[in-house]
Image (spheres, rainbow, N blue to C red):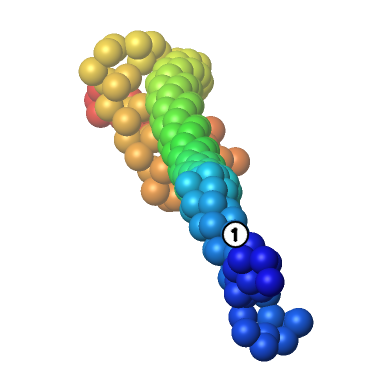
Amino acid sequence: MHPASVAAEGVGWSGASPLLPQPGEIIIGLIAFAVLYWLYAKKVVPRLEQLYAERAAAIEGGMKQAEEAKAQANAALEQYQAQLHEARTEANRIREDARAQGAQIVADMRGQAQAEAGRITETAKKQIDAERQSAVVSLRADVGSLSTELASRIVGESLHDEARQKGIIDRFLAELESGQIQPEKVGAVESSQALADAAPEGQ
């Protein structure tokens, strides 16, 4: 037998099953697996980890942005509510101030009106008193003058003496005010008084 053929026949598994790979195939497979594993570990896995990290960062960034947006929205809502509460409080304060100022204005106007009414009433009272006093003085003078004139005509002499005339007038008016002399009897009483005062002088 040829030595080469013998050597060729000695290569491989003795009595091996046709399903089992040859040793050369196993070595080639291991080398190929090592190369693939190296490529996968050096190229594929880092790239996948980078993509995963970027994706996770993007997701975390989106969540963070969402949380920040939510926080800003909550802050804006709280600020709006605070401003609304402040505006309502200010509106209530302005309304209360307006009500108080209105009440004060009404009270001031009422006080001014009462003071003005009191002043007008006092002025009118003083004017009425002055006019009454003037009327009394004028009436007293007129009544005294008429009474004196009437008594002078009855007695037949002049009673224009100032002291005598003043005494007669005062006594007549006092009796008239006290009710001792009725208005319809004034002439008779005055005439009688004038005669009584004139009688001693004639004697």
Q: Is residue 133 left or right of residue 103?
A: left
Count of numbered marks:
1
User: Residue 51's spot in the image, x, y percent?
Assistant: 57, 46
Taking depth in this image into account, of 190 and 25 the one nearest to the observer is 25
Q: Position of residue 70 (x, y in %)?
A: 55, 51
Residue placed furthest toward the front: 1
Above or below, comparing residue 148 to residue 193 in the picture = above
* Label 1: element kind: helix
The percent coordinates of residue 29 (x first, y second) are 61, 63
Which quadrant: the N terminus?
bottom right
Q: Is residue 83 visible?
A: yes
Q: Dot 1: few (<14), some (14–19), or many (≥20) neighbours within 10 Å?
A: few
Q: Residue at x 32, y 35 (%)?
A: 171
- Tell me: residue 185, above or below residue 150: below
Query: From the viewer's perspective, is residue 88 above or below residue 151?
Result: below
The percent coordinates of residue 43 (x first, y second) are 53, 44
In the figure, 11 relative to 128: above or below? below
Which of the 4 quarters of the picture holds residue 198?
Answer: top left
Q: Residue furthest right?
A: 18
Q: Quadrant of the C terminus?
A: top left
Q: Which residue is mark 1?
A: 28
Residue at 63% of width from left, 62% of height from top?
4
Residue 175 occupies quadrant: top left
Q: Is residue 144 left or right of residue 45?
A: left
| Residue under the point 36% across and 15% down | 159
Viewer-proximal residue, 161 or 68?
A: 68
Could you tell me which residue is drawn at 55 percent across and 64 percent down? Answer: 27
| Camera-side residue of 123 and 5 | 5
Question: Label 1 amino acid?
Answer: Ile
Q: Is residue 45 visible?
A: no
